[in-house]
Amino acid sequence: MGPMNAPPRLPGGGFAVWSRDRLAAARRGAEECGDVWQLEPGVYVAATAGPCEAVLHRARDFPKAPSPLFPPLKRSGGAPTPEERMHAHAARMRGLRAQAVAARIGEIAPRTARFADEWPTDRDVEVLPLVRHALADIGVHYLFSEDAPALMPYAARLFLAREVLVRPTRWAWPHWVPTPARRFRTRQQIAFTDALRPVVRRRRSSGRLGDDVLGQMLRPSSRHGPLPEEAVLDTLPGITVATFETPSRAAGWILLELARHPRAANRVAAEAALLPADPAATTIAHLDSLRYTQALVREVLRLHPPSWLLTRRAMRQTQLAGYTLDAGSTVLVCPYTAHRDAREHREPDRFRPERWLDDADPAAKPGAFLSFGTGPHGCEGTALAMAMLTLLTAQTARRHHVSEPPGPEPSHQVTTFEGLTTAGLRLRAAPRH
Ligand code: HEM
């Protein structure tokens, strides 16, 4: 098989069309070309569930590039070895898996309740900064417990560094050029690491390692012993931002859909009425009982996957969905279009949380829900994200009617550059009585 078998090109497509409206171009590509299409020579888009899943699972054929956002810092001690990285990953996952999250619902719930309580009512409010503040409080606390307050300001500046870095620029500078944004990023990464280092040393020398994610990373494993300090510190800037950045984008979409679907919001409020009056008494059993709220969160993530485009590289020439992809090409995996495929989801553009409660719906099939990715690089924080977002949704709907501001001004602008975002989202909350 040769170039004859290349994926179809989108007529009139290419980067010019893509950069004008990336969501529209992605939808047109999926409609007109099908499973896999070609944006430019050497740039392919996996547009439907099957090929998306295949690319994410075949991590050897389609490796993920190391995150350019927080690259490992150069250090005199040397970078962690691949074994140390694997060990660090396993240790992190002990702290992030579903059972670990389940044990800490009572710490998460009061912070989501506080978000709802502190939302200024009866006027338009720009909500994303408020949401981000609440979720950062939860995320940083989840990772570092009583050391969280000291680390919060550094976490906020890491987020800022990322925002500056992903802002579209006229020139795509090669990754080794130290642009001002990249120098700012590196300074914040160093500042965060320098603030965390004494915490790591104090916990180790006192023997009180802690029951949080950092504590899990400090526990020696039977096979590898204790992790070197650099291997503990290395990944935590990225993980820290991950705990609240994507979840905040998701929360923006959730609050917007609550505003647009008052009946769904009423149903969430009814479910949330069964939560304990003292949020600190909330347990995993309460969270599990919020079935409709969880379905609503999932439905929002299906329609508006914040990570709507994932990047992989084809190292060798390889086959995908019957097409031949060139060695060295880029493969863009598109959960956004996969989620709006009528073969996978009935009435795919409709907001219908009930679909997740109906076992007969095709939505239950593997590959039909890719908002957290899948395969070896699937999201590490799925359980934490679902817990935070479900509680935030329930507590908010329980206390408030949420609505879009009246008048002709749009409540937000959809941006797609880093994640799918309701940029500038303004909403209004009125207390429910
Ligand atoms: C609604 C919230 C979230 C969404 C939609 C989301 C989505 C994703 C997706 C799609 C990926 C796969 C990226 C790829 O394959 O290229 C991913 C990876 C990842 N996520 Fe999340 N995420 C969320 C929350 C979180 C949270 C709370 C954490 C906290 C620890 C987290 C940590 C990570 C990490 C560390 C990875 C990288 C895994 C790897 O490369 O091996 N995420 N996430």
Image (cartoon, rainbow, N blue to C red):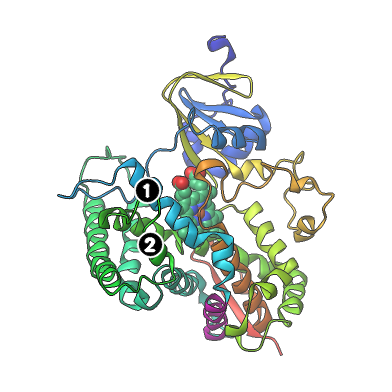
Magenta stretch holds residue 428:
no
Question: In front: 161, or 277?
Answer: 277
Q: Position of residue 384 (x, y in %)?
A: 54, 64
Check residue 264 in the rendering and tell me which mark sits there, or answer none.
none
Residue at figure coordinates x 57%, y 51% from the top left: 372
Residue behind mark 1: 168
Residue at figure coordinates x 66%, y 38% from the top left: 49
The quarter of the picture where the C terminus appears is bottom right
Residue behind mark 2: 219
Question: In front: 136, or 179?
Answer: 136
Q: Quadrant of residue 389?
A: bottom right
Q: Position of residue 97 (x, y in %)?
A: 54, 59
Q: CA distance from mark 1 to mark 2?
A: 41 Å
Name the main secondary structure of what is drawn in magenta. helix
| Local secondary structure at mark 2 | loop
Q: Residue 385, relative to residue 138: is it above or below?
A: above
Tell me which amino acid carries mark 2.
Answer: Arg
The quarter of the picture where the N terminus appears is top right
Earlier residue among tags 1 and 2: 1
The residues colored magenta run 106-118
Q: Residue 351, relative to residue 269: is it above or below?
A: above
Q: Is residue 409 visible?
A: no
Mark 1 or mark 2, whichever is nearer to me: 2
